[in-house]
Image (cartoon, rainbow, N blue to C red):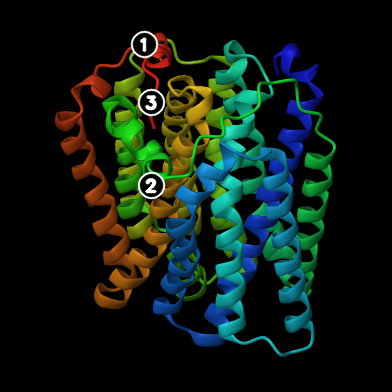
Amino acid sequence: MDSSLLKNPAFLRYWLGQTATNLAGQMLMVAIGWQIYALTHSAWDLGLLGLVQFVPQLALTLVAGQIADRVDRRRIIIACQTLECITAAVLTYTTYSASITPEIVFACAFLLGVARAFESTTMQALLPMLLKSQHLSRAIAWSAVLRNLATTLGPPLGGLIYIFGAEVVYATGSACYFAAAALFFAIRMPEVAAPQREPVTLKSVFGGIVYIRNHPVILGAISLDLFAVLLGGATALLPIYASDILHIGPVGLGLLRGAPAIGAVLASIYLARRPLKRAVGRVMFTSVVVFGIATIVFGLSHSFALSMASLIVLGAADAVSVVIRMTLVQLETPEHMRGRVAAVNSIFIGTSNQLGQFESGVTAALFGTVPAVVIGGIGTLLVVATWMRLFPMLTNRQQLTTGAHEVADHKSKS
């Protein structure tokens, strides 16, 4: 890692706290997914699990962005991690006491969605406050390394711990959330100007949407991610693949869930050491094409080895797209707008992930598991072809920093 990042204790605590949060979330998703399928044996319920996490994110994230631009961002994150810690503890108790029901699982998933609506938005907005702008691209890439490493280790670790009982997974996740909150509590924020206290109006709440709409490069990048992952996401159906197609059990499910992060870690390390310097637009579109092809291969596979390999490639391609998108968003957004722009970005991410899970569950229930995944991969390829024509400025974008100074001067009036 860049020595300037290593010497920044605030960034290091942010880095480790974010990792602990992601590790806990990944372990919990394995346990929750496996448990709900064991309770109901329903693809529809697996999709519904994604929907109940997406609804609060859709409803609350714009509000979260407004709050993140007005309130101490560190305190918001600590409050969210405290809620996640308590929710995981509730799952621990109800599972241990054999009082767990699908309704309790869905309710806890909803609360986790509420916490993430505020947490993900605020984390995105907090990072640029901890370091200088010239270090931001590498910081985002290194954050992606540990985030994806947690995503790599979290699912197989969750699957392994699940052998001892779902309650052990939930208790471990609760401890991780507590550790993350302690790390963020220890962050000492640099001296910065107090956040602007503009009146809370509909115009200010929706300011992030207006800002993104007026910047086609950002709009194209985050909407590409939205529709590509919405259609191409197959992770919601991994419990079915593990149980009914590959016959590999909860440990195998953990390995499948962690496979995309293996590729993402490798790609993120490469990008952290060798940041992209040219043709970033075409690199982004190419990575999404690879994502779509890997999704199709996974959907058709009946081999555990081929399934793992395709998910690793899928994860690497997605990581390239994410690093480009996140860097573009951060560099081209002024400080007083970062919370609201991050909120819109979080909605797009949540839509592609949680609503994508619901879409996968519905299509699997209607057409079957394998056709649902293959159709999604084909849809991703069609999205790429369409977006390259709709957003020529993004297609032809050469450098991550091009135009950043122009955006900085073009302050949103919201």
For marks 1 and 3 on the same chain, the one whose residue lies earlier in the sequence: 1
* Closer mark to the observer between disc 3 and disc 2: 2
Image quarter for residue 390? top left
Give the left or right position of residue 12, taking residue 288 as reference: right
Residue designated by label 2: 202
Callout 1 crowding tier (Cα within 10 Å): few <14, some 14–19, many ≥20: few
- Marks 1/2: CA–CA distance: 26 Å
- Marks 1/3: CA–CA distance: 12 Å
Nearer the observer, 74 or 265:
74
- The residue that appears at 40% across and 37% down in the rendered structure is 208
Q: Where is residue 73 in the image (x, y as percent from the top left)?
A: 66, 39
Mark drawn on residue 406: 1
Nearer the observer, 297 or 85:
85
- The residue that appears at 81% across and 54% down in the rendered structure is 178
Where disc 1 sits, the SS reads: helix
Residue at the limit of the structure toward the front, as seen here: 199
Image quarter for residue 359? bottom left
Where disc 3 sits, the SS reads: loop
Nearer the observer, 240 or 409:
409
Residue designated by label 3: 412
Q: What residue type is labelled 3?
A: Ser
Residue 153 visible in the displayed image? no
